[in-house]
Image (cartoon, grey):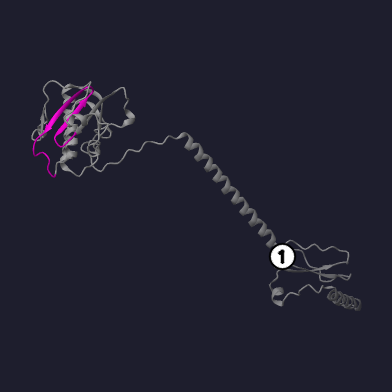
């Protein structure tokens, strides 16, 4: 190897030492030198070869970020140094953009669901809920729902009972039955007599060959429940409702029950031995159902 080659190497080393010594004085007092541990963990991400020697002196520039310290050599003091964007900043921007996109998607979905519900509530008609019964005297209801009955088709009837009499009003006619002595017991009370009034009415309408819908007005809630198929704790009341159901199965009419007050029940006057103008007593023989013969007598 020639002497010129060794001299060239010696000159280059001196230039590098001079550049490093100058860069030490150019560092700002605010710059914190990285710890040896951080320098050991840093890895180069560039694929370009690094030039260790340069014929011209270089200036060392330091760029410090919260997660990275970058050392860069400049050919001249006028060379601008643009630190590369860190991967952390890019990652944070991507995460923020992803969150914003998800929030917008959720908001759009909520608006769409709200619009769908608003449109559905304006077009869907709520169905009328039919009360659920725990026990039925028969497979079909004895009293038809009010919504299916027209006032022009319904025949107005009234039934009522007192401790001594049962009265039935059909249109402009009435019929009174006497309750026999000893009829009232612990198992048979006034509600049983009110239910028996429905049974007597059904028997009379069947004998008349009535068809269509019959509107029956009663002031007894227990009798109306039994006739609508609901369970009543008194067995005698349930037995009377079952017998009425058997009559309806072989007839051409149905019963529509309506709850009224005692003061507006037209049959109440007849149970107390009174009459009303415009009403006449039913003629002909009235057949009392066999199960009621021990307790009821037609007058």
Q: Is residue 22 visible?
A: yes
Q: Quadrant of the N terminus?
A: bottom right
* Residue drawn 85% across the image and 76% down it: 25
Q: In the rendered structure, does residue 184 fall within the stretch colored magenta?
A: yes
Q: Position of residue 62 (x, y in %)?
A: 79, 69
Q: Position of residue 245 (x, y in %)?
A: 19, 33
Residue numbers of the magenta segment:
161-186
Q: In the rendered structure, does residue 113 fall within the stretch colored magenta?
A: no
Q: Nearer the viewer, residue 73 or 102?
A: 102
* 251 lies left or right of 50: left
* Residue drawn 62% across the image and 50% down it: 101
38 lies above or below 87: below
Q: Position of residue 295 (x, y in %)?
A: 10, 35
Find residue 43 and report its image quarter. bottom right
**Residue at disc 1, secondary structure:** loop
* 180 lies left or right of 146: left
Q: Quadrant of the C terminus?
A: top left
**Residue wearing tag 1:** 45
Q: Nearer the viewer, residue 291 or 166?
A: 166
Q: Is residue 246 visible?
A: no
Find residue 164 and report its image quarter. top left
Find residue 263 and report its image quarter. top left
């Amino acid at each position: 190897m020639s002497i010129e080659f060794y001299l060239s190497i010696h000159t280059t080393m001196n230039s590098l030492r001079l550049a490093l010594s100058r860069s030490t004085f150019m560092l700002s007092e605010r710059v914190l030198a990285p710890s040896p541990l951080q320098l050991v963990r840093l890895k180069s991400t560039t694929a370009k070869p690094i030039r260790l020697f340069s014929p011209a002196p270089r200036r060392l520039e330091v760029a410090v970020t919260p997660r990275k310290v970058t050392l860069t050599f400049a050919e001249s003091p006028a060379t601008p140094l643009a630190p590369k964007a860190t991967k952390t900043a890019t990652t944070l921007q991507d995460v923020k953009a992803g969150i914003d996109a998800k929030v917008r998607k959720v908001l759009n979905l909520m608006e769409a669901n709200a619009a769908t519900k608003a449109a559905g509530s304006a077009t869907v008609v709520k169905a009328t809920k039919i009360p659920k019964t725990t026990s039925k005297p028969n497979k079909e209801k004895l009293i038809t729902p009010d919504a299916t009955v027209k006032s022009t088709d319904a025949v107005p009837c009234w039934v009522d009972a007192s401790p001594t009499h049962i009265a039935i009003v059909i249109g402009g006619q009435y019929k009174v039955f006497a309750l026999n002595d000893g009829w009232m017991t612990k198992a048979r009370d006034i509600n049983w007599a009110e239910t028996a009034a429905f049974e007597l009415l059904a028997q009379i309408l069947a004998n008349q060959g009535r068809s269509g819908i019959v509107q029956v007005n009663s002031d007894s809630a227990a009798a109306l429940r039994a006739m609508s198929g609901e369970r009543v704790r008194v067995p005698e009341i349930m037995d009377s409702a079952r017998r009425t159901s058997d009559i309806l199965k072989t007839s051409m009419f149905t019963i529509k029950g309506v709850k009224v007050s005692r003061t507006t029940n037209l049959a109440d006057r007849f149970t107390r031995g009174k009459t009303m103008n415009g009403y006449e007593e039913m003629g002909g023989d009235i057949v009392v159902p066999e199960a009621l013969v021990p307790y009821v007598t037609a007058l």
